[in-house]
Every structure is written in C-alpha cells, then in structure tokens.
Amino acid sequence: MLLTVNHVTRYFYDQPVRGVVQSHRLMPSQCAGQKMRSWKVSVSDGQMGGGFRDGAGDWVQGWTVLGPVNEITVHVTGEIETFDQAGVLRGHKELTPPDCYLRSTHPTEADAALAALADGLTPAQDALAAAHLISERVSDAIVYTADTTNAHTTAAEALAQGTGVCQDQAHAVIAIARHIGLPARYVSGYLLVGIDGAAHDAAHAWAEVFIAGLGWVGFDPANRCCPDDRYIRLGSGLDSLHAAMIRGIARGQGEESLDVSVTVQATQTQSQTQQ
C-alpha cells in the first residue's frame, strides 16, 4: 500500500521563551514492512543538530530553535510504501538485547489487577499464543474511548476505570507481558484508519512482544489486530515517554500548549509485492 502522511505539531507559549531544544523520533523505521519514498521533517526557525541511530534501531534527530519565540511548528510530510508482514518486525537492525525490555517503568507497572489478566497464560509453552491472549484481554478490559485519559495515565489507572486510548492499551499489554516474562515495548507511528482513501486523524501506538524464534511481533489492542500494511512504524521504547515522537525542553517561563494534526491517506491500495 502507498501511504502519504501530513503531520503538524504547533507549540504555543503565552510569553516568549529564550529557546527550545527538541529530540525527534520522526523517521520511519528501516524494516521489511515499509519502504520510504520521500520524507521531510521541518521545524520553523529551527537549526538541525546531530542525529544518531540508537540501540533499538531508531533514528533520533536533534533540533534547536533560538528565541525569543512564541510559536514553533514541526511539520512532517512523506510518502511510504508498506507491506503486510503479519505483525512480525522483519529486517530491522538493532543492538539492544530483548531482555532489556523486561524492565518495568511507572506507566507499565503491573498491579494486582493487571497481573490477574495473565491468569492461565503459559508463555514457556506457547509464547505467541500467550501474547495474542494478552492483547485480546486488554481489548476487553480497557475499552477504547477517546479523551478519557491523559499523557500521564498509567496502565493500572486505565484498567481501573475500564476505558482509555491506544497509549493506555499498549502500556497494559506491555505490563502484562513483562509480568509473565515476555520482553515487550511501546511503538509509536501512524495508522490509516479507513480503507476508503480519505484522510484520517491517525497518530497511533501499539505494543511489540518478543517471541523467541520469531522476533518482535506487534499487537494493537485498540483495533484487535497485529499491525499490517495500514501501519507506519516510527520508533520504540520502554513506554510512551521513551518512544515519544517529539521530546523537548524550553528555556523560559512561558506556559506551553500544543495543537496536533495528523492525517494518513492511501494513494494506492492494490496488492503490493515486495521486491
């Protein structure tokens, strides 16, 4: 499938700040499931700094904006060809050992209720089946409901209220998988929500679980599926903070607010054969 992306993030400050430094994970992953045709990231009045590929295989790019400044716009546009890999991350080079993703973080700590969702799962016998069941149970236990949580909501809090967004559901899958000894991580990216070719608001997140003998496999409890050719993978991390598309710090006292618009459109939907 051929997908186009238009992603605009605008930062506003109620009084000028002296400068802003940002770290981006906005470049598509290099893997068998996607092939970049064109991609551009721009920052208004920004100066591109150093970039590097981290141990997880993700490209991290630094940007600096010199102040005084009241508004910053980060604009991502691109075209990418995607291929259905049945959720398996193939051809992605990375150095970080999978066991590093057994470490819990605050958003992914498994309380008693999350641990209870792992009842009866035996990953030592069939880790892939266990991972599928985890995703299914999270889909049932945390009903996708927009605007019911915030960026700081933990998996345990989302489970307690029974609603959340893709971030919360991914955190819950990760928490449960780690609880039973399966390495798991958070993935940020884009999703073509519909198949009608129309543009959709489509920033998205899902989880990956490491299955011995197979590798990293993606699970999207928000849509009850594994990632396919509707998905564009950008970066990964221990949780949503580590995998954030944009992280930054502003020098000054101005209060920050932001507005985000993301659209993904299919410009070619016929079956593709990877060369």
Image: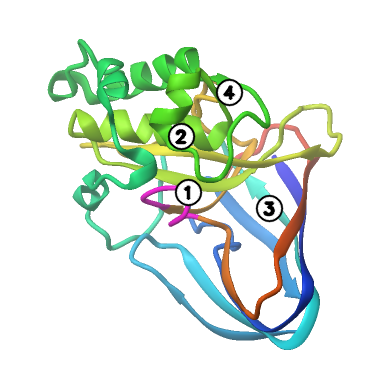
Q: Mark 4: give few (<14), some (14-19) or many (20+) Cα within 10 Å.
A: some
Residue 240, disc? 1
Residue 200 in view in this figure: yes
Which residue occupies the foreground of this view, 6 or 118? 118
The image quarter in which residue 247 lies:
bottom right
| Res 86 seen here | no
**First in residue order: circle 1 vs circle 2:** 2
Mark 1 neighbour class, 10 Å CA radius: few under 14, some 14 to 19, many 20 or more: many
- Horizontal placement of 244 versus 190: left or right? left
Q: With respect to residue 228, does 95 lie above or below? A: below
Label at residue 80: 3
Precedes in sequence: disc 2 or disc 3: 3
Q: Amino acid at mark 4?
A: Asn
Identify residue for label 2.
170
Label 2 element class = helix
Q: Residue at x 43, y 44 (%)?
A: 186
Callout 3: 10 Å neighbours few (<14), some, many (20+)?
A: some
Q: Which residue is mark 4?
A: 223
Q: Tell me where residue 67 sits by quadrant.
A: bottom right
Q: Amino acid at mark 2?
A: Ala
- What residue is shown at x 52% (from left), y 38% (from top)? 167
